[in-house]
Image: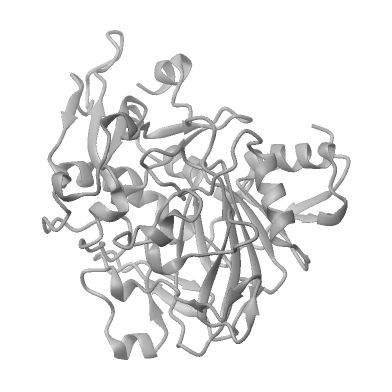
Amino acid sequence: MATTHFTYNPIPLPPSADPVHFKDFGRKVEGFDPAKIDDSQMEEIIEMLYKHSILLFKNLKLTPKQQFEMTHAFDPKTESYGHGNNKTGSTKASILHPDLKTIPHQPQVQLIGNGRVPEVYEGLDHPQLKHPHHRTFHKEPVSLEDEENGITRFYRWHIDAALYALSPPKVTTLYAVKVPQGEPQTCRYDDGTGDELKVPLGGTVFVSGKNMFDILPEQYKSLAVRTKVRYAPHPYVWMSKAHALPTGLGIENEGLEMDLEDLPEWDESKIKVFPVCWKNPVTGSLHLQVHPCGAHQLLIDPLPPTSSRENALYPDGATVTDLAQVRDILYKLQRPGISPELCYAQDWEEGDLVLFHNRGLLHSVVGAFTPDQLRMFHQCNLAASDEPLGPDAEDLKTHA
């Protein structure tokens, strides 16, 4: 596509990132005015997002209505927030409940952040915001002493998605209204590898699902293209008493998940079963896209009859229902893809707008704020009007 409307430059990478893996990942967009956007400009932005996974706009003034309209342009047939409009407020048991405040006049846009807003804001009366902290979710959080010395964790690697009844949003838009300043922190993986990552205070860390797939050895690529994930019903309620691994990439095996019969009423037809790999609608690339915390079972297809069985994993296919085994397989597929050199941490400034391809990457919040540090963001994503596409016959021929 001959771009005609805007200028695109690579996003500034942290020193820890390996530029080889970021050639196509992330672009900073110059020349955009949300008050003057037309259809052809929006078409260009949509195509560029699918090519580059993240678009960063600086120094914007953006209303909740403009943010909703930009998000909506990616999927004009949908109107509902990714978890259902105003649904998070009523589902008190959900682990998402404390983190979201719905903007009343634009219910698809959420106010998220940290601290008490000192005034009535966008129709919300002095809202109290709560930044997710790994202490509330990880089995073994870092010590208070380490935290005082700037040590933090990935809170939870995820895709923005309800994973039950509603389809995963195509794009999430995040707009920084107020960003507290502070020293960078060190995000520790604490998984025995010694891996750590320098992160800005309260940054958002992204990894490419395409990189996550591309770096896998062949037998794991074969497994990935043959596997589907069946998610738990009401997964955020199901996992509400469970704890995360220190990397934030999945759940510890402690048996703390709720029994399915104790969950809010659920319907078999609304259970989500998604391929492990999702196909990019513009580039055709495969992105390894799994929300590891909500995964309940794996459905593995057998190898095609013409494929070599040498070193093959699950050559005859399998239905994996043992949670520990489900998690072990997914961890082997996903952990290489969150290595420090594959992470991009967004260092937020007020007026930043980030669009990210929610079906092409994983992200996590990092960091810890003190109660008096005020952080305010507008977040919007919309439950999609269609499901993600998995690998096609050609992909299976190449990888399975």
Percent x, y for residue 344? Answer: 54, 60
Image-quadrant location for residue 222 = top left
Q: How is the image coloured?
A: one colour
Q: Residue at x 23, y 25 (%)?
A: 312
Image-quadrant location for residue 18 = bottom right
Residue 106 seen by the camera: yes
Q: Residue at x 82, y 38 (%)?
A: 39
Q: 309 or 260: nearer the eye?
A: 260
Q: 379 or 198: nearer the eye?
A: 379
Q: Is residue 311 above or below residue 82?
A: above
Percent x, y for residue 94? Answer: 32, 59
Q: 380 or 185: nearer the eye?
A: 380
Percent x, y for residue 258? Answer: 16, 53
Q: Is residue 313 above or below residue 165?
A: above
Q: 24 or 294: nearer the eye?
A: 294
Direction from residue 397 to residue 303 in the image, left or right: left
Direction from residue 363 to residue 64 in the image, left or right: right
Task: Tell which residue pokes out farthest to the top in this image.
Answer: 306
Q: Is residue 18 above or below residue 48?
A: below
Direction from residue 382 to residue 288 in the image, left or right: left
Name the image quarter holding the N terminus: top right
Direction from residue 103 to residue 93 in the image, left or right: left
Image-quadrant location for residue 281 = top right
Q: Residue at x 32, y 42 (%)?
A: 333
Percent x, y for residue 322? Answer: 12, 40
Name the image quarter holding the C terminus: top left
